[in-house]
């Protein structure tokens, strides 16, 4: 006879997946981590599922999904005209620059979920803010109530309050950009298959908040400083034009100073 299952330690609990939401690969302009490194980091951190959300791109997530070994949700952190919006379970890239509402429409049209990363964050130029969030509320499936890159606690408090007042499912966002750093924030989520089940599973998730370690911020600061130097005009720092163009290509597609 099979032993009785305890409601906490039984099959249900064992089926929960350690899930990181909002992580980047080098298909983002501000990340140095290949999809292969992401899968490696995930396995080292005991992560079962990763929602890969590169800036305005889904190609890195598709590559990571093909590698196997970790369940990958194909997502994108879209730079809408009103701020960053995450789409999950995407099949096609959503272009940046659209309004929050149009961005949400494009996500929903392909069966995806709409998430609001790092709302209210003042150090990031690309947060949605209260007005845009209010407009986006009818489309919102989840809101990020802790971002592991955010070190101002009242911003997370404000996000938690928004989630509670507007009855939006909360999640925690890892937002890691660098090789070797993953799962400062994660959630334990019941097993799921597809966006509808994931949305339901997220409502039952156990959220584990955290912050990236100091070494992460120090390395990011050095990288951002280097990017600024690389963008300075040629006459200001010497060197040949082809070398600088090569560096710019290596550096990525965009150039905002704040990693987000
Ligand atoms: Zn962002
Ligand atoms: Zn991000």
Image (cartoon, helix red, strand yellow):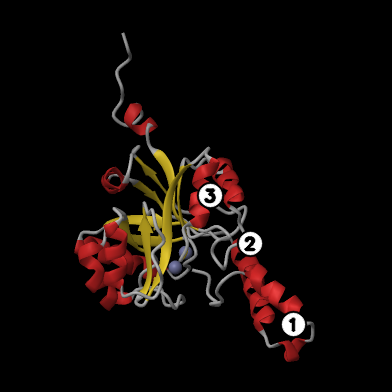
Residue 237 vs residue 222, the one in the foreground:
237
Q: Nearer the viewer, mark 2 or mark 3?
A: 3
Identify the residue position indicated by label 3 in the image. Answer: 63
Identify the residue position indicated by label 2 in the image. Answer: 215
Q: Give the mark, 2 or 3, whose residue is nearer the N terminus.
A: 3
Identify the residue position indicated by label 1 in the image. Answer: 241
> Looking at this rendering, what residue extends furthest in the top direction?
1
Residue at mark 2 to residue at mark 3: CA–CA distance = 28 Å
Question: Is residue 196 found left or right of 174 in the rendered image?
Answer: left
Q: Give the mark, 1 or 2, whose residue is nearer the N terminus.
A: 2
Q: How many marks?
A: 3
Residue 8 vs residue 229, the one in the foreground:
229
> Which label was assigned to residue 200?
none
Q: How many residues crowd around disc 1 within 10 Å: few (fewer than 14), some, or many (20 or more)?
A: few
Q: Is residue 59 above or below residue 49?
A: below
Image spot of residue 72 (x, y percent): 45, 46
Name the element at disc 1. Answer: helix
State which quadrant residue 135 falls in: bottom left
Tell me whether circle 1 and circle 2 mark residues in contact (CB < 8 Å). no
Question: Is residue 92 found left or right of 5 in the rendered image?
Answer: right
Q: Nearer the viewer, mark 1 or mark 2?
A: 1
Image spot of residue 21 (x, y percent): 42, 53
Residue 196 vs residue 7, the one in the foreground:
196
Q: Residue at x 55, y 61 (%)?
A: 27
Q: Is residue 3 above or below residue 224?
A: above
């Amino acid at each position: 006879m099979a032993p009785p299952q305890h409601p906490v330690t039984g099959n249900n609990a064992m089926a929960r997946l350690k899930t990181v939401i909002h992580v980047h690969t080098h298909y983002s302009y501000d990340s140095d981590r290949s999809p292969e490194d992401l899968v490696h980091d995930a396995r080292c951190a005991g992560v079962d599922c990763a929602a890969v959300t590169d800036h305005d791109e889904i190609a890195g997530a598709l590559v990571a999904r093909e590698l196997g070994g970790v369940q990958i949700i194909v997502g994108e952190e879209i730079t809408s005209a009103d701020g960053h919006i995450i789409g999950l379970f995407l099949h096609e890239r959503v272009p940046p620059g659209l309004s929050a509402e149009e961005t949400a429409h494009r996500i929903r049209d392909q069966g995806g979920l709409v998430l609001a990363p790092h709302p209210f964050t003042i150090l990031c130029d690309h947060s949605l803010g209260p007005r845009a969030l209010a407009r986006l509320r009818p489309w919102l499936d989840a809101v990020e109530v802790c971002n592991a890159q955010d070190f101002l606690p009242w911003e997370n408090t404000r996000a938690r309050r928004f989630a509670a007042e507007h009855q939006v499912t909360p999640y925690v966002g890892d937002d890691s950009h660098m090789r070797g750093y993953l799962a400062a924030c994660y959630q334990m989520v019941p097993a799921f298959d597809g966006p509808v089940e994931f949305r339901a599973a997220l409502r039952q998730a156990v959220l584990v908040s955290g912050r990236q370690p100091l070494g992460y911020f120090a390395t990011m600061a050095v990288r951002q400083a280097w990017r600024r130097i690389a963008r300075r005009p040629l006459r200001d720092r010497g060197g040949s034009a082809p070398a600088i163009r090569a560096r710019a290509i290596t550096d990525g597609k965009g150039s905002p100073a704040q990693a987000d």
